[in-house]
Structure formats: C-alpha cells, structure tokens
Image (cartoon, rainbow, N blue to C red):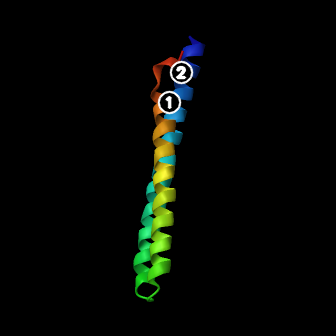
Amino acid sequence: MKRYRDAYLVARATATIGKVIKGIGILVIAMGLISAVQSASGGRGEAVLAISLFTALVGVLLYCAGVLVAAQGQNPSCVS
C-alpha cells in the first residue's frame, strides 16, 4: 500500500512541477511584452522586436516543457 501512496505522491509532485514551469513560461512572455511596450516609446524598434521575439521563444519553450512534465505526472504507466 505504501508503494502506491508514494507513487501517487511522485505523480502529483511531477504534475505540480509541470504547472510551475508553465506558469514561469507565461510570466516570461508577459514580462517580455511589458518590456517591449515600455521600450517602444524609446524609438528602438529593432531592439524591441528582438526582445519580444526572444522572450516569446523562451516563454513558449518553457510552457511546452511544462506541458511535457505535467503530462508525465499524469501518465498512468509511471504510477505503478
């Protein structure tokens, strides 16, 4: 019985870590958009575009990694 309880604890922790990673990805995207909007008034169009694209890429990659980690926690074959 302890084995199953421990397995479900690990699965729940893995899913939670995935959710945290997804949240960080969304936060990175939001911070990039905020900094891009604030920098747009400075007249540095190329820099704003580069910052926006880079943060969007990093945020999307983090979000995708979070989805994969959370899905691993939901995988029933990993619980037993």
Name which residue lies at 54% across and 19% down: 5
Residue 52 locus on image (x, y percent): 45, 69
| Closer to us: 29 or 73 | 29
Dot 2 falls on a residue whose secondary structure is helix
What amino acid type is highlighted by mark number 2?
A: Cys
Q: Quadrant of the N terminus?
A: top right
Q: Residues within 10 Å of mark 1 (few under 14, many from 20)?
A: many
Rendered position, 25 above or below 17: below
Residue 76 locus on image (x, y percent): 46, 20
**Which numbered disc flags the more N-terminal residue, 2 or 1?**
1
Which residue was labeled with disc 1? 73
Name which residue lies at 41% across and 83% down: 40
Name which residue lies at 48% across and 58% down: 57
| Closer to us: 26 or 44 | 44
Q: Residues within 10 Å of mark 2 (few under 14, many from 20)?
A: few
Q: Which disc is residue 40 wearing?
A: none
What amino acid type is highlighted by mark number 1?
A: Gly
Q: Which quadrant holds residue 37?
A: bottom left
Name which residue lies at 52% across and 57% down: 58
Disc 2 and disc 1: Cα gap in Å? Answer: 8 Å
Residue 38 locus on image (x, y percent): 43, 81
Rendered position, 6 above or below 58: above
Rendered position, 51 above or below 71: below
Q: Quadrant of the C terminus?
A: top right
CB within 8 Å, label 2 to label 1: yes
Question: Which residue is situated farthest in the front direction here?
Answer: 46
Which residue was labeled with disc 2? 78
Residue 66 locus on image (x, y percent): 49, 43
Question: Which residue is situated farthest in the bottom direction here?
Answer: 42
